[in-house]
Image (tube, rainbow, N blue to C red):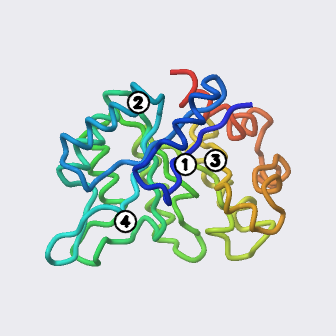
Amino acid sequence: DKAMIVQPINHLYDHRYVSAALRSHPQRLRGMLLANPTATPEEAVLELKRLVSDEGFSGVRFNPYLWPVNEEGLGTMNDEVGRALFDACGTLSLPVGFMFFQGILHRLGGEPAPTHADDAVALMESFPDTKVIFDHFGFTNKFESPEAWRRLLQICDAFPQVYVKVSAPFRVSKNGYPYDDIFAQQLNELLRVVGAERLMIGSDFPFVQEQEGGYASHISRELLAKVNGITESDVNAIMGGTADKLFFKV
């Protein structure tokens, strides 16, 4: 078995814990580091390169809520440091995982700041070699926020470098376990627009352990089987094949 470990937010930019795990199991584990938008562009890129070359990280998380805001309280990931980091990720073949806890239409500080979706599109248009992962269904629910859901699908359709992590359904579902609104309907639409080769499962460990059904029930083939027309090949891709190609076979 293999796994991708994402840098825990409580450790911020201290990557020693995950680095130790990567050194212990270099064939089985990959790591996603946390981008530091509070450093200068030069310092941020230098540290990113060090973590890749010396510690073995192979992906980068962009958490927009760590980005500084201006005097008006507005922020954007499409600033000097964000662009430098995103460009470096493309050069180094490092997928960027966007963690949009407030949804893809959220604005840092409100209007006229760009939405998270606007930031992602601007970065991808400028640096198309950088692959992108929208974590946790992009934190969208098609029934509660159809505008956000349409925007997510539009981005996926327009940018072939976009992947979606079908993870943490408890964060976006309104029906609760076993998340029929997500797996029977929302994932069905994602599969049609994006394709299984750009979808991947995720655990949201350790938080998933606190949910009904526990860890195993949230990343099970039984949940994926709720999707109409899904094939065994699709399930294999979502359950590991996509992530394997993205992080282990580069």
Q: Is residue 233 above or below residue 163?
A: above
CA gap between label 1 and label 2 equals: 23 Å
Residue 143, image x, y percentages: 60, 74
Q: Earlier in the sequence, mark 4 or mark 2?
A: 2
Residue 227, image x, y percentages: 76, 53
Q: Earlier in the sequence, mark 1 or mark 2?
A: 2
Q: Is residue 164 above or below residue 91?
A: below
Q: Earlier in the sequence, mark 2 or mark 3?
A: 2
Q: In the rendered image, which quarter contains the N terminus?
A: top right
Q: Secondary structure at mark 1?
A: strand
Q: Please name whichever residue, 191 or 249, is drawn nearer the observer in this view of the structure.
A: 249
Residue at the image position 62 percent from the left and 69 percent from the top: 172
What amino acid type should be assigned to the residue bearing mark 2?
Answer: Val
Q: Which residue has dot 2 on it?
A: 52
Report if the CB atoms under discs 1 and 4 are less than 8 Å apart: no
Residue 164: numbered disc: 1
What amino acid type should be assigned to the residue bearing mark 4?
Answer: Tyr
What amino acid type should be assigned to the residue bearing mark 1?
Answer: Val
Q: Earlier in the sequence, mark 3 or mark 1?
A: 1
Q: Which residue has dot 3 on it?
A: 191
Q: Please name whichever residue, 177 or 54, is drawn nearer the observer in this view of the structure.
A: 54
Q: Earlier in the sequence, mark 1 or mark 4?
A: 4
